[in-house]
Amino acid sequence: MPLHILITGANRGIGLEMTRQAAQRGDRVIAACRHPDDAADLQKLAAEDGLQIDIIGMDVADDSAVAAAASQIASTITGALDLVVANAGQMNARGGLQDPGHTQDNIAASLMTNVAGVFFTARHFVPHLRAAASNGGTNNVAKLAVISSQMGSSTRAGISAPIYRASKAAATNLARSLSMELAADNIAVGAWHPGWVQTDMGGSEAAITPQTSAAGLLLRFDELSMQTTGVFEDYAGTPHPF
């Protein structure tokens, strides 16, 4: 059964590839990004025959912008979403304490996108998920997927990119908290490490392609249930320590 899916950060990398693969399998995808007019690859994908992709502008770090997008979707596209993928993210510095990239503005941008962005997306799109679950959804369950990172695991802490690591730890913690808060609504929540992926963030030396990561992630989302809500694992289904 085709799904109605919202994917944030859909203009590039893993988000773009998840959009592509979900639409190609027959799902209707709402692809959200900050600047749709500049998202040439996403615009080209949405223009392909047979794909159901609606592009919307949404800055996940702006609470009012997320609220406006949620209202727009409810009134003009669909009132129910089977799956929301909180994928938008930023890494503004890779070094340790003395990395000059750790400016006040960069830190604020990373935390607002990677942490507050997950929170705002969940807050304003839970009504859409609740509607899908109450209408039958996929086995009467709607789903919220948070794209985190193994770099957010406190068990696997490292010295590089401490702000990014902290933001992903917080995103994973949010997913776990939301899994408990939303259980009564039959909304399952999980956090996923997408792998070390060949994207602008991961670099050309990364281990896997966006195609491999996206395919694995979509399978994980399909498998998510109320029995596994609160999970933290990678794109291949391997559990990650918190």
Image (spheres, helix red, strand yellow):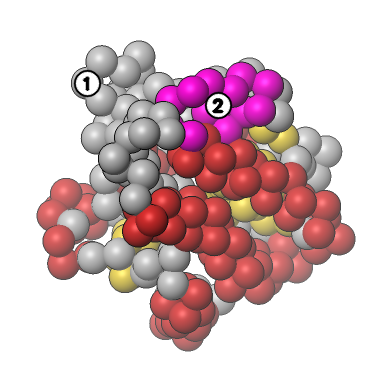
Q: Say which of 104 and 111 sits in front.
A: 104
Marks 1 and 2, how far apart in space? 19 Å
Q: Residue at x 73, y 55 (%)?
A: 178
Instruction: Provide residue 191's location: percent of width, then percent of height.
Output: 62, 39
Q: Which residue is mark 1?
A: 204
Instruction: Provide residue 148's location: percent of width, then percent of height.
Output: 54, 38
Q: Which residues are magenta?
A: 150-162
Quarter-wise, where is residue 201 in the image?
Answer: top left
The single residue placed furthest to the right in the displayed view is 184
Vertical comparison of 66 with 190: above or below: below
Give the structural element (helix, strand or loop) at label 2: helix
* Left or right: 143, with 120 as reference point: right
* Left or right: 24, with 79 as reference point: left
- Pick the quarter of the image with the C terminus: top right
Q: Which residue is mark 2?
A: 150
Q: Is the stretch drawn in magenta largely helix, strand or loop?
A: loop
Q: Residue at x 43, y 34 (%)?
A: 97
Quarter-wise, where is residue 230 in the image?
Answer: top right
Lower sequence index among marks 1 and 2:
2
Q: Say which of 146 and 95 sits in front.
A: 95
Instruction: Provide residue 181's location: percent of width, then percent of height.
Output: 81, 59
Residue 105: tell me if it is visible. Answer: yes
Which numbered dot is residue 101?
Answer: none
Residue 13: tell me if it is visible. Answer: no
Is residue 153 found inside the magenta-colored segment of the image? Answer: yes
Amino acid type at circle 1 is Ser
